[in-house]
């Protein structure tokens, strides 16, 4: 007997908008056509497309989507588009920054406010609303992502007396799972994962190194959704750390 499978069961209010529909809306969105795609992935329950926000930054990347060796660690503004054909996510757009540590390291730091959503419901104008909204989002993202680049750069000069202990104490509140937190602590001493490696056994480091370690660990977090959550946690740690440093004269002291 032939077999059949059900991918998802939706309510009657659900408006079907598949991945091809999202791509069509992207192509019709003002200011998006021609932007450089640096990564795209489709799983059973999600699609994520990452692209550069500034056309001139495409010159920094080779045909394999990786930054040239001389420009590794150079953060550039990017955005990503999400969709789920099975109800796992609405159509979403977020901004952030992208930098390559090596051929399998994608690092991101999000502003935390850069999240636009379009629920899977509506009438016949759904395509037009998403296409128009994506164009508006990209214009907003260019401003927000430049701010994220500045904050990431500022984090390099924020000294932490014990980077590993900071992750142990702040990781849970930021939203990191125990597994991703431990992977981030291990990544602190990985010269491929972190621009300025520090001891994973406990010791001095920088806020930028902590952020790098978390976003590196996010790549092995499992699903695209788990990766997104870990990267969002990295932003929370970055934001909290910058605020703490301003109150403490530019550094962070973590009590053991």
Image (spheres, rainbow, N blue to C red):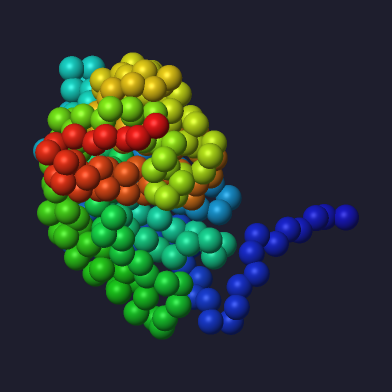
Q: Position of residue 146 (x, y in %)?
A: 13, 46
Q: Quadrant of the C terminus?
A: top left
Q: At which x and y percent is residue 110? A: 28, 48
Up-down relation of residue 80 to residue 193 (above or below) = below
Q: Is residue 31 visible?
A: no
The residue positioned 50% from the left and 46% from the top of the image is: 226
Q: Is 13 placed above or below 236 here?
A: below
Residue 189 rendering spot, x and y as whole percentages: 38, 18
- For residue 140, which quarter of the picture? bottom left
Quarter of the figure with residue 92: bottom left
Query: Residue visible at 31% across and 19% down?
Result: 197
Could you tell me if residue 165 is visible in this image? yes
Residue at 18% from the left image edge and 23% from the top image edge: 71
Outermost residue to the right: 1
Say which residue appears at 46% left-offset and 46% top-offset.
172
**Which residue is at the front of the view, 74 or 8?**
74
In this rendering, the count of numbered labels is 0
């Amino acid at each position: 007997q032939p077999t059949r499978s059900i991918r998802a069961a939706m309510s009657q209010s659900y408006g079907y908008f598949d991945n091809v529909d999202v791509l069509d809306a992207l192509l019709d969105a003002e200011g998006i056509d021609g932007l450089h795609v640096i990564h795209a992935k489709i799983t059973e329950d999600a699609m994520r497309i990452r692209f550069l926000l500034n056309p001139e930054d495409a010159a920094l990347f080779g045909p394999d989507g990786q930054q040239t060796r001389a420009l590794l660690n150079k953060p550039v503004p990017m955005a990503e588009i999400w969709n789920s054909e099975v109800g796992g996510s609405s159509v979403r757009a977020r901004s952030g920054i992208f930098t390559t540590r090596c051929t399998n390291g994608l690092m991101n730091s999000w502003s935390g406010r850069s999240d636009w959503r379009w629920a899977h419901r509506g009438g016949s104008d759904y395509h037009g609303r998403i296409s128009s909204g994506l164009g508006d989002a990209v214009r907003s993202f260019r401003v927000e992502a430049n701010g994220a680049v500045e904050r990431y750069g500022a984090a390099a000069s924020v000294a932490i007396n014990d980077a590993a202990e900071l992750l142990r104490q702040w990781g849970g509140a930021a939203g990191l799972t125990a597994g991703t937190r431990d992977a981030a602590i291990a990544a602190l001493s990985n010269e491929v994962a972190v621009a300025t490696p520090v001891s994973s056994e406990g010791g001095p480091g920088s806020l930028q190194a902590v952020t790098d370690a978390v976003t590196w660990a996010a790549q092995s977090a499992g699903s695209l959704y788990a990766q997104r959550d870990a990267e969002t946690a990295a932003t929370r740690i970055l934001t909290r750390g910058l605020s703490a440093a301003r109150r403490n004269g530019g550094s962070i002291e973590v009590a053991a």
